[in-house]
């Protein structure tokens, strides 16, 4: 079967449909949707992260739709079955800059004939959702962030390879410091920005399917060592406390990093939140598209090439109703020291709730969909 046939087989029976839609910003977007689309139905847009797809929202979409919402999840630019993008390493990065990712979602909303929406973002979808809310508050009426806190747009420092909301945070050359630890390390985001990263994952010895199985397992609550805590500062010594999927051993690729934590056959069989059939949706699509589309996002972020696009919004808060949720076992909440606290204390001025969900790691809406549904619906009803 084709990747699209595999996806439709896994979604049709649970009340989710799939189609393509031109977004007016150069893309023919693949979307999953659930619920009624009449003019009186509020729209909720769900934005996935890396390495995920619109499919990552499958476990919560029908239930949100049952509460009276039209729910749509796109494969974002660079991902999945969405067309109209190219992502060779040599390609222009401008289409993947944050402002254009926001325009993709605004264009999608207009193509769906909605004038406003509530936006939800997970992982790298979180800063896109927050950027939608901050730059287009005329359109987006509510914001839910998952797993990745938003602490405002970054301020460029004198070190042009770093960004920060704290002028002192990146004073040290963090990469040199990580490399000179007794156990030399490197930061995963800058690894993802290298030329080699896509090839490392596409041609890894274990194959894409097993790589993704290990990657998802390693960052989930199923990996017993995921017991996160706050980091005091942006220093090599503090960052080295993060698991190796965030701060990697210097000489290892990401597939090599997660291979050592590959779940056992019994663990795979018992993994109800990500069955082999469900994982096959991801692996079949990524085996065809590669990972470079998503990696372009990391390149834009780490290189700071388009920060000037956001200068007019630096220092501004998100003023629409907002909430945050993540897995209690998710290190992603703390990987940027201080961001979780700044988000609640300043960046989201109408912050209504924060939930760290038990028995969930980074893939919170897949690992524990019921509490995510309950908390999200409660938040939606306040808007």
Image (tube, rainbow, N blue to C red):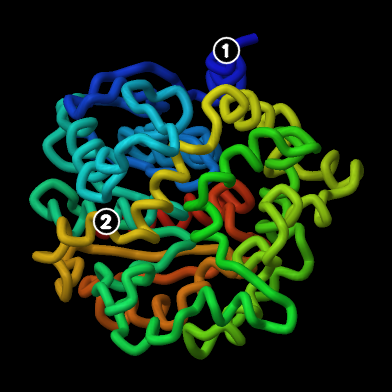
Q: Which residue is mark 1?
A: 5
Q: Residue at x 48, y 62 (%)?
A: 147
- Res. 212 in view: yes
Q: Which mark is residue 145?
A: none
Among numbered discs 2 and 1, the one appearing first in the sequence: 1
Q: Residue at x 71, y 61 (%)?
A: 251
Query: Which of 21 and 35 lies nearest the eye of the viewer?
Result: 21
Q: Residues within 10 Å of mark 1 (few under 14, many from 20)?
A: few
Q: Which residue is mark 2?
A: 305
Placement of 354 over or under 217, stated as above or below: below
- Res. 73 in view: no
Question: Secondary structure under badge 2?
Answer: loop
Query: Which of 34 and 309 lies nearest the eye of the viewer?
Result: 309
Q: Whole-Å distance between the Cαs marked 2 and 1?
A: 38 Å
Q: Quadrant of the N terminus?
A: top right
Placement of 158 over or under 259, stated as above or below: below
157 vs 121, left or right, is left
Q: Residue at x 59, y 69 (%)?
A: 331
Placement of 56 over or under 241, stated as above or below: above
Percent x, y for residue 77?
35, 34
26 vs 280, left or right, is left
Percent x, y for residue 242?
63, 74
Q: Residues within 10 Å of mark 2 (few under 14, many from 20)?
A: some
């Amino acid at each position: 079967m084709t990747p699209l046939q595999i996806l439709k087989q896994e979604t049709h029976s649970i009340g989710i449909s799939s189609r393509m839609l031109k977004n007016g910003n150069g893309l023919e977007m693949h979307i999953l949707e659930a619920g009624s689309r009449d003019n009186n139905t509020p729209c909720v847009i769900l934005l996935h992260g890396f390495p995920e797809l619109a499919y990552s929202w499958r476990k919560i979409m029908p239930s949100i739709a049952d509460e009276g919402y039209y729910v749509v999840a796109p494969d974002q630019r660079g991902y999945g079955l969405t067309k109209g993008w190219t992502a060779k390493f040599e390609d222009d990065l401008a289409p993947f800059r944050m402002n254009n990712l926001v325009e993709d979602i605004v264009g999608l909303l207009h193509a769906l004939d909605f004038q406003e929406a509530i936006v939800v973002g997970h992982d790298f979808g979180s800063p896109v959702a927050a950027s939608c809310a901050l730059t287009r508050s005329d359109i987006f009426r509510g914001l839910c962030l998952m797993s990745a806190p938003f602490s405002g747009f970054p301020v460029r420092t004198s070190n042009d390879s770093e960004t920060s909301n704290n002028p002192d945070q990146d004073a040290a050359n963090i990469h040199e410091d990580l490399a000179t630890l007794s156990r030399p390390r490197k930061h995963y985001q800058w690894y993802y920005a290298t030329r080699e990263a896509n090839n490392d994952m596409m041609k890894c010895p274990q194959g894409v399917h097993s790589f993704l199985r290990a990657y998802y397992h390693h960052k989930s609550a199923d990996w017993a060592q995921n017991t996160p805590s706050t980091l005091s500062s942006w220093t090599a010594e503090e960052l080295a406390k993060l698991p190796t999927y965030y701060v990697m051993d210097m000489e290892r690729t990401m597939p090599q990093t997660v291979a050592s934590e590959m779940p056992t056959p019994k663990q795979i069989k018992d993994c109800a939140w990500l069955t082999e059939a469900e994982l096959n949706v991801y692996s079949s699509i990524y085996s065809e598209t590669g990972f470079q589309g998503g990696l372009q996002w990391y390149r834009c972020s780490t290189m700071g090439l388009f920060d000037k696009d956001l200068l007019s919004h630096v220092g501004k808060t998100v003023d629409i109703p907002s909430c945050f949720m993540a897995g209690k076992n998710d290190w992603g909440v703390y990987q940027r020291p201080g961001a979780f606290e700044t988000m609640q204390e300043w960046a989201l001025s109408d912050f209504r709730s924060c939930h760290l969900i038990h028995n969930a790691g980074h893939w919170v809406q897949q690992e524990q969909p019921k509490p995510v549904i309950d908390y999200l619906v409660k938040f939606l009803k306040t808007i």
